[in-house]
Image (cartoon, rainbow, N blue to C red):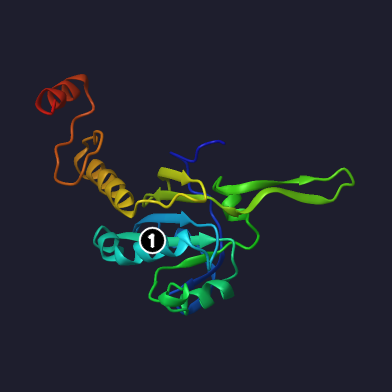
Amino acid sequence: METLIGKKAPAFKATAVVKGNQIVENFSLEQFEGKKDVIFFFYPLDFTFVCPTELLAFQRKIAEFEKRNVAVVGCSIDSEFSHLAWLQTDLNKGGIKGVEYPIVSDLSKTIAENYGVLAGEYDYNEDGTVKFNGAPVAYRGLFLIDKNGVVRHSVINDLPLGRSIDEAIRTVDALQHFEKHGEVCPADWKEGADAMTATHEGVSEYLATHQN
């Protein structure tokens, strides 16, 4: 699969549910260009098991993203009506009531396919009819898109593997630190820790003071 890193995020216009209860047409990530970084993430299906833990975890941390001027947007291959029903279902009944960031409907699976996270592919039978090999849902893909609409980070998990929301925040911090200070961020860097200049001298100085 060809990476999207360093390239413009694939554009789309699709139906989405926003603020937990409003269906909007022609939702696009382009509305954030020049204004906000974006965490755009895919999940397999509404009304499943690992998925609500992730969507609710993003909502619990939404203030952390907002103070970093980052928009969080989810997406799956479910319809907007499925999204809406799930968003209106209480947590104790398997729902995600309380989630307010946008959730995009990708019924055609073209958004997942363009982002390289569709867990299968279309093919043809010997008689010329279309078949789908694999699971017709999205892997757990996550993309950090900067204010210019360029993909700066991505991670894709298989269906059983839930993601770390704290790692998404850490990566946002690293990108914003680099953009503000011009310093690159070493392994396991966190906000407030030392970064380094992208030179041999900078690396040597960092390693000399962080050997342990």
Say if residue 14 shows up in the picture: yes
Specify whether 133 is left or right of 112: right
Locate the N terminus by quadrant: top right
Q: From this viewpoint, which residue is outermost toward the left?
A: 209
Specify whether 24 is left or right of 127: left
Q: Is residue 99 above or below residue 175?
A: below
The residue sitting at 90% across, 46% down in the picture is 127
Locate the C terminus by quadrant: top left
Three-letter amino acid code at the position of disc 1? Val
Q: From this viewpoint, which residue is outermost toward the right?
A: 127
Across and down, in percent, residue 7 comes to 47, 41
Q: From this viewpoint, which residue is outermost toward the front?
A: 92
Along the viewing direction, whichever of 117 and 147 lies nearer the viewer: 117
Across and down, in percent, residue 210 comes to 13, 29
Label 1 environment density (alpha carbons within 10 Å; few <14, some 14–19, many ≥20) = many
Q: Is residue 204 above or below residue 29?
A: above
The residue sitting at 24% across, 34% down in the picture is 184
Across and down, in percent, residue 202 comes to 17, 25
Q: Is residue 203 above or below residue 75?
A: above
The residue tagged 1 is: 72
Say if residue 19 shows up in the picture: no
The residue sitting at 53% across, 50% down in the picture is 139
Across and down, in percent, residue 75 comes to 51, 61
Q: Is residue 71 above or below residue 153?
A: below
Specify whether 48 is left or right of 31: right
Q: Where is residue 80, by image quadrant?
A: bottom right
Query: Element under label 1?
Result: strand
